[in-house]
Amino acid sequence: MSTLTIAWIALPFFVGFIIYLLPKLDRYLALGMAVASAGYALQLFTKRSPLTLQLLDNFGVTLAIDQLSGYFILTNALVTTAVILYCWHSGKTAFFYAQTIILHGSVNAAFVCSDFISLYVALEVIGIAAFLLIAYPRTDRSIWVALRYLFVSNVAMLFYLIGAVLVYQTHHSFAFAGLRGAPPEAFALIFLGLLVKGGIFVSGLWLPLTHSESETPVSALLSGVVVKAGVYPLVRCALVLDEIDPIVRLFGVGTALLGVFYAIFEKDTKRMLAFHTVSQLGFILAAPKVGGFYALTHGLVKSALFLIAGILPSRNFKELQQKPIDTGVWMALVMASFSISGFPMLSGFGAKVLTTKNLMPWQVIAMNFAALGTAISFAKFIFLPHERREGQGNIRPGFWPATILLIGGLILANVVYFEAYTIANITKPLAIIAVGWVAYFLIIRRSELKLPRVLEQFEHLIGGMSLMLILLFWMVFA
């Protein structure tokens, strides 16, 4: 198993370079690698004990693979597979598929790291690969958005690296457990880096512009899996260190409320989905023990929603209310929206119930408001007009295979938590959804309120990072 794991981690990078040598096989090699990752993830759920690999004993460089890793790796595999299927007939070059698989491999590596230095390497590779994919169209706009993402990411990782060095100075080990007993500064610096990379709370306000302005398949990758590379270490640290758990939960609640507040009033489809990515990352952090399952359901549904949003006739909700969309596309949109809203028969329901049962008492009211905001936000999609159309129109040939894979995954993932299907558990989400729909029709649909975007401006992102660092210092010293 140890040899298989090392080979599985290294293989995507090898395949990525092979794609350059065999460009005619680019799609097949990329698809094969994503399917192999799915197979590896599924066999992790049959293992009763976690696998730990000591790579450098004296430095605490360790890989830890268990069911939590399995959920995140499976999310990466399914989302990457769907994106490759979506792009199958799009004429993407070998460069695109190579970078996609390198990104896939580096995200996988981040999901098995149990120390700060190997995680740093994985996150830096993720940043470079994501930058190249965001800039892939080579337009002035895409290059600026990519450079903006890269600069913010690199500044955050500089803080992170200083924190990792402080941990090593204290324990002569980079292991996650080294946060216990490390200087408070180490905690603050490491967490700032992870909060930025994961798109958490105000540190994640770089995310809406980046995800909404990227190409549709890249948006699906970014929101589906890439930001989770910053979330996973926070979840793992919360599980390893009890004293960190309340802080992670607090950021989870703040993130869920901030993201959903912006999403409710957003008039642009892709920006609304991007803000909702911020909010849903908060749900993952709010209950770290079950964060893996929530990450899986969110990754599948958000990738599906971005792929669907990419073929809608407009990004403006006001225009979409006047332009009926194809009924088949609308049905896929409704199923994905139902799942993220917590409707039964889709895995989003089980994930929300499981998360609710693992909340602390002080979190419950706030997270119920976040769930209500989710129902309000996705009512915008659910109640769009639709009509049956002949032919495919502007639908890509790979759209339906990708969408069916993702929505099928949402249906099959119900097997994880069948116990959720009780009268009490079903009644509460349905009531929240009903109240959300009423609020949408009575208030939000008629609202013309536009929230300011000043905090998303480049110079303010760096300023916000500084303020967040001060907040983290205050929290750890208090």
Image (cartoon, grey):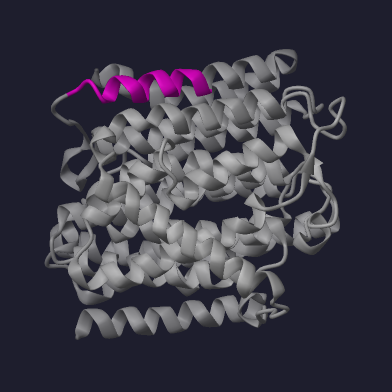
Q: Magenta span: helix, strand or loop, mainly? A: helix
60 left or right, relative to 140 = left
- Queried whether the magenta region covers residue 35, the answer comes back as yes
Could you tell me if residue 106 is visible in this image?
yes
Q: Residue at x 33, y 52 (%)?
A: 427
Q: Nearer the viewer, residue 61 or 76?
A: 76
86 left or right, relative to 347 = right
> Where the C terminus falls, by quadrant?
bottom left
Q: Is residue 188 above or below residue 42?
A: below
Residue 390's image quarter? top right
Residue 173 position within the rendered picture, expressed as x and y whole percent measured from the top left:
19, 53
Could you tell me if residue 284 is visible in this image?
no
Q: Residue at x 61, y 24 (%)?
A: 17
Q: Residue at x 35, y 66 (%)?
A: 367
Q: Is residue 333 above or below residue 29?
A: below
Q: Nearer the viewer, residue 69 or 330?
A: 330
First to last magenta residue range: 34-47
> Where the N terminus falls, by quadrant?
top left
106 left or right, relative to 332 = left
Residue 101 position within the rendered picture, expressed as x and y whole percent measured from the top left:
57, 30
